Image: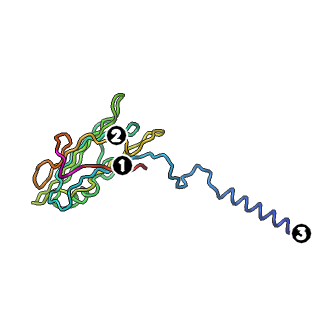
Amino acid sequence: MVKISMALFFSAVTVALLCLSGCGSDGDADDGDHNSIPAKAVIAFKTSLPVGSPEKIGSVDLVFELPTGVTLATPAGTIPTGANGLLKLSGEAARFAALPTATTSIIANYTPATATSNATVSLSAIATRTDSGQGMDAGVFATLTCDITPGVTVTTANFKPLSSALIGNATGTKLFDTLGGITGPASASYNVTLQ
């Protein structure tokens, strides 16, 4: 009886050990480890206006510098846009573009890094209407998906706006221009998400 109990005990321990060795992680799979190295950076470009402002955004022009090791999966020149493009209308611009009387366009150019300068993106978005309506509301208007070179450490603080200008549709005047010294009432900014 004792021999049978000992044999059953060792059999149970062996089965348990086999189960544990087969159920664990080998460390190679993505187990939800939040310390993984990001491969993509998604930049969400946005505008803002004071609460209650009657103004609408008619156009946005900006130049943005990408950090070392951040590139676009496209050659120098025009950045692909649209549903499958790297640059997409989003947020307020996408909502505006869905209006039957709205015309929204976005175009951007990519200049890859050189030995002496980082890569840059020059972007222009225009929102007009064929009726008496105005432009788009302030908020996120475009997203750009970038690649991060393997082995390069990038933080969101490494991204750098160089210049931006906003023109209002209601007045047709500049609402913000970093090069012209116009600091309001609108502003332009961005959020970067590392993935």
Q: Nearer the viewer, residue 183 or 22?
A: 183
Q: Secondary structure at mark 3?
A: helix
- Find residue 66 and name its label: 2
Is 4 a magenta residue?
A: no
The count of marks equals 3
Q: CA distance from mark 2 to mark 3?
A: 73 Å
Q: Secondary structure at mark 1?
A: strand
What percent of the width, then of the height, locates residue 164? 22, 44
Q: Which residue is mark 1?
A: 192
- The residue carrying pointer 3 sits among few (fewer than 14), some (14 to 19) or many (20 or more) residues within 10 Å by Cα, namely few
Left or right of 134 on screen, residue 108: right
Dividing the image into 4 quarters, which one contains the N terminus?
A: bottom right
Q: Can residue 164 be seen here?
A: yes
Which residue shows up at 16% across the image and 49% down it?
Answer: 175
**Nearer the N terminus, badge 1 or badge 3?**
3
- Find residue 177 and name its label: none
Amino acid type assigned to the residue bearing label 1 in the image: Val
Foreground label between 1 and 3 = 1
- Find residue 2 and name its label: 3
Span highlighted in magenta in the image: 182-187
Q: Can residue 78 be seen here?
A: no
- The residue carrying pointer 2 sits among few (fewer than 14), some (14 to 19) or many (20 or more) residues within 10 Å by Cα, namely many
What percent of the width, then of the height, locates residue 19? 70, 60
- The residue carrying pointer 1 sits among few (fewer than 14), some (14 to 19) or many (20 or more) residues within 10 Å by Cα, namely some
**Nearer the N terminus, badge 2 or badge 1?**
2
Q: CA distance from mark 2 to mark 1?
A: 11 Å
Amino acid type assigned to the residue bearing label 3 in the image: Val
Amino acid type assigned to the residue bearing label 2 in the image: Leu
